[in-house]
Amino acid sequence: MIDEPADPFATPLEILPEWYFFHVFQILRTVPNKLLGVLLMVSVPAGLLTVPFLENVNKLQNPFRRPVATTVFLIGTAVALWLGIGATLPIDKSLTLGIMSIRTSKMLFSSYES
């Protein structure tokens, strides 16, 4: 035998998913409760699906005249990039960046609901 048998309950910390799953991986790694992590992942597309109903505008209008949709897009893109970059860092820095970005995005998106 070359090495000791693999333990399925002890995953090494240096395992990373493909680059297009970094933001999802970072959310799951940041949130201690896995059910809450899955709900956060589901809330992102669900929130994006509600944007057209928040602003009832003509399709031919300039996107910069739609402040809610433009802001949601820009913040969502920034948070996805931030989570993707954070997932490649060591675990202590990664968790700090993940917690900051999740709190910031939830705070900004919840201000549109009120």
Image (cartoon, grey):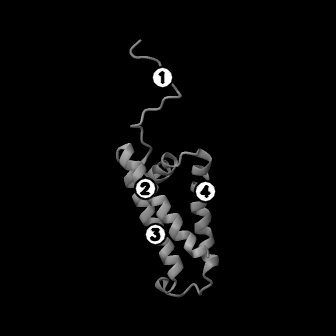
Q: Residue 42 carries which label?
A: 4
> Which mark sits nearer the N-terminus, 1 or 4?
1
The residue indicated by pointer 2 is 83
**Residue 78: percent from the left, percent from the top?**
42, 65
The x, y position of residue 85, in whole percent, is: 37, 54
What is the spatial separation of the Cα atoms under label 4 and label 2, in whole angstroms? Answer: 16 Å
Hey, what amino acid is under mark 2? Leu
Q: Name the residue under label 3.
A: 75
**In this figure, which residue is indicated by the disc labeled 1?**
6
Q: How crowded is mark 2: few (under 14 residues within 10 Å), some or many (20 or more)?
A: many
Q: Inspect the image, locate mark 3, and give the three-letter code of the amino acid beneath it.
A: Ile
Query: SS at mark 1?
Result: loop
Q: Is residue 35 left or right of residue 64?
A: right
Between the residue at mark 2 and the residue at mark 1, the CA separation in whole angstroms equals 29 Å
Image position, residue 13 (x, y; %): 41, 36
Disc 1 marks a residue whose amino acid type is Ala
**3D distance between C-alphas at marks 2 and 3:** 12 Å
- The first of marks 4 and 3 along the sequence is 4
Please state, as top left, top right, bottom left or bottom right, where the N terminus lies in the image: top left
Distance between mark 1 and mark 4 Cα atoms: 32 Å
Of marks 2 and 1, the one in the foreground: 2
